[in-house]
Amino acid sequence: MFFLSRWRKDNKDFYKFFKNVLGFVPRRTQIYQMALIHKSKSQETFKGHKINNERLEYLGDAVLSTVVAEYLYRKYPYQGEGFLTVMRSKIVSRANLNKLGQKIGLSQLVRYNREVNGMFKSVDGDAFEALIGAIYLEKGFRFTRKVIISKILCTYLDIDAIAHTEWNFKSKLIDWGQKSHKKVSFEVVRVLSGPRRQYESRVVI
């Protein structure tokens, strides 16, 4: 892949990250370098194919979700499906993965268009999922599972604290409305302009 030469000056930090954070040294470095290229820094091959981490992100998302689901299933043997589903959603949420990516130092390695300040809110989380996809392709599921659990979940996350953290306030309102026999609805008041579309909403009871 022609873009590898651009990474030579970063090789020291690149290998240090893998050895210190993930506990191994990659052999197929091309795939890991691709995992750290955001679509805003896409490169094209001579055939016109774009090189970025979107496909690896897709794969890593599936692997991460599976590993987290199994981990929670074993950690909480007496909890029901609802609790496990909510817990998995909290752990693999974009906000949590962004924080996780920043904690482990991905922000310094990801290549993206930094001139567009504030436009790409999920760069670190996307790169984290892509990294998981890359590990899976090189090392297989069992190795990837071990890395996710021992090097990430048990090192950088307080799972029990996450269990007691409320995050889906919309669902809480809906549940309250059903139990209290109140009609709860959500209305968009206006659409806010900017690099990322945002909505101002209100709750009507």
Image: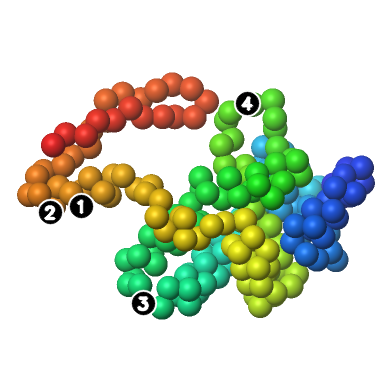
Q: Which residue is mark 1?
A: 175
Q: Residues within 10 Å of mark 4 (few under 14, many from 20)?
A: few
Instruction: Give the mark, 2 or 3, whose residue is nearer the N terminus.
Output: 3
Element at badge 4?
A: loop
Closer-to-camera residue (64/194): 64
Q: Of tags 1 and 4, which is closer to the observer?
A: 1
Q: Marks 1 and 2, Cα distance to the nearest angstrom?
A: 6 Å
Closer-to-camera residue (52/125): 125
Q: Residues within 10 Å of mark 2 (few under 14, many from 20)?
A: few
* Amino acid under disc 3: Tyr
Q: Of tags 2 and 4, which is closer to the observer?
A: 2
Residue 148 coordinates in the image, percent (x, y)? 63, 65
Q: Marks 3 and 1, Cα distance to the nearest angstrom?
A: 23 Å
Any part of residue 195 in sight:
yes
Is 195 located above or below residue 55 in the figure?
above
Residue 94 coordinates in the image, percent (x, y)? 51, 48
Q: Which residue is mark 2?
A: 179
Checking the image for residue 117, the label placed there is 4
Q: Marks 1 and 4, Cα distance to the nearest angstrom?
A: 38 Å
* Amino acid under disc 4: Asn
Q: Which residue is mark 3?
A: 78
